[in-house]
Amino acid sequence: MPASTAVSLSKVSRVFGPVTALDGIDLDVRPGEFFAMLGPSGSGKTTCLRLVAGFEQPSSGRVAIFGEDVTGVPPYRRAVNTVFQDYALFPHFDVRDNVAYPLMLRKVSKAERHAAAEAALEMVRLSGYGARRPAQLSGGQRQRVALARAIVARPKVLLLDEPLGALDLKLRESMQEELKSLQRALGLTFVFVTHDQGEALSMADRIAVFSAGRIEQVGSPEDVYRRPANRFVADFVGSANILPPGLVARLAGERRWASLRPEDVRLVACEGADPALVGRITARSYLGASTRLALDLGGLSVHVVRPAGELLPTEGPVAIAFEREALHLMEREA
Amino acid sequence: MTRPPRRPGGSLADALWRRPGLLAALLLALPVLWLVVVYLGSLAALLVQSFYALDDFSGLVVEEFTLATYAQLFTAANLAIIQRTVLMAAAVTLASAVVAFPIAYVAARYARGWRKAAFYLAVMLPLWSSYLVKVYAWKLILAKEGILTWAFAKVGLTPLLEAVLAIPGIGGNSLSVSYIGTFLVFLYVWLPYMILPMQAALERVPTNLLDASADLGARPGETFRHVILPLALPGVVAGSIFTFSLTLGDYIIPQIVGSSRLFIGQAVYTQQGTAGNVPLAAAFTMVPIAIMGLYLWGAKRAGAFDAL
């Protein structure tokens, strides 16, 4: 079978005692893709990753990697490697031996595996750190070592479990770019788990949004951000405003829930505005590049984000306005 | 907001809070008095004694520096005692490690909740009863008329038992008067001291390191060799220090179960008691201390504590 999918899950469920962590998931990851599994904690995204790595077995369903059924295959026989959330570096090895570990297991000669480890370390910009112990490195450096160790044996798929979770903001941003360019350079399939929607949107080619053991939507960052399938996705990915069916029927003629991005909303004068879109400002926070306002529209709470420098009303009633295209009617009910 | 009112004793608490070093000194004062002054002091007194010698005619200790007592220690008969004891301690330690590891591993990796409590109880329970009672119980178990002989006969393995007892050097008339018997009792009595530190060390090996090892291609045996064993080694060494030093110094077990040949502990006991030769007893006591020092130094050199 020609492998048109890198990772394929079909009807996969995972039950831990009374808890259903995954509930009949179907998912296909394409070869060479940067794929994100996004969701709040407890949504099943990490369990999903562990099923692909082989640390967990599905209660039912099948898992395939490049067309090969790996259900029931232990992790050490799978062509996938994992970058762990807390890095999981071996404390009793130096950096070089950590990175060379998969090659040592494959009985590669010492000289060869040390050369390969050094090359992998160079790729993550850590050349010259081979003789240090993991304990002597900073969080960001450990993260890179974990990355080098996971790619040194050239897996078919690289799994990353919240890889940037423990890093500070600045480091996280630079690592995002680095991961992306590393993925392009290696031409590898990356599957990464995150609860940070910004990270998923900026790095991934496609995103699967998880909630309560199910996948709510799979699509490009643009898809899940602009065209969320339901209220959960709209709310979780970028905290959209959610408008109830009654209001949407008046505005767009269809009785459905709709999402509206805060940055698509303008503030206008009250005269001549739809009375349902008139309200007052309840909170204001300065975000540097923009300002975020909370509005109360007769009981409906709406957030508005305006670029810095725009003159904003400080008191009194205001009205909101937006383009019809900004209003996204949602397909399903969450 | 008002500050909480000062209560009696508050100024002491404040003073200690301001000077954490003082608190540490207060906490350490008694233990230091005990360990340094009493323990190390008596050890030093012992060391000094070992450099005195017994006057053969008067039977009194001559308080003059001499190496005569150590010369006496290294005579063939006394060296045989040392060799016997060290071999026994090494055998007991090795066997304890082999027997304890699976038990400690299962307890650390798989036991949770009441099963873990049951494990601790099972390991500690033998420590609750008197050591002498246990040793005498073993004497009965191992005796010629004991339950082991009976059990071997029941399953038709008497020839096997006889073959084992016929092994020269470690065999004997029955298990209770052979080195094998002494070894079995040592193994039983000291086993908890090996299991507990091992289990603690194994428990500290993070599960995600085992996941990572498997993920990178290590079969379970390889994960054990490359990750679990090196990280648990400090615990194994800690356990072996217990079993090794306890066996080196014990004088009751070999007296009750085993042949009549002496171990270091018994030699110390006889020399300072019946024979009244305190210098030789002191010299004998220095042997386990020296061996343990060498053992720890060797373990450190071999990297046993690198994972700490």
Image (cartoon, coloured by chain):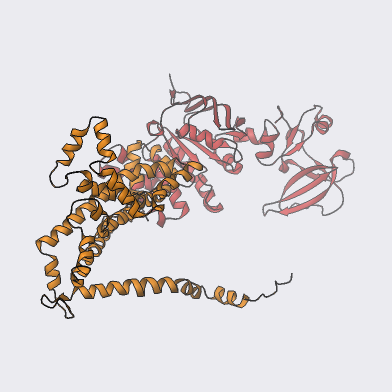
Question: What is the x, y in percent for residue A184?
Answer: 46, 38
Horizontal side, residue B159 vs residue A290: left or right? left
Which residue is drawn at the image coordinates 77% and 48% (left, top)?
Answer: A294
Locate the N terminus of chain A by quadrant. top left
- In the rendered image of this protein, does residue B42 appear above or below residue B192? below
Q: Is residue A26 above or below residue A49?
A: above
Q: Indicate the position of residue A227 as horizontal and vertical percent values.
A: 67, 32
Q: Give B185 or A285, whichever is nearer the viewer.
A: B185
- In this view, the residue in front, B226 or A270, is B226
Quarter of the image for residue A300 reads top right
Q: Which of A143 and B182 is in front in this view?
A: B182
Q: Where is residue B98 drawn, in percent x and y?
A: 30, 44
The C terminus of chain A lies in which quarter of the figure?
top right
Identify the hue of chain A: red
Q: Give the chain coloured orange.
A: B
| Residue at figure coordinates x 84%, y 31% from the top left | A250
Where residue B33 sits: x, y (%)?
A: 40, 74
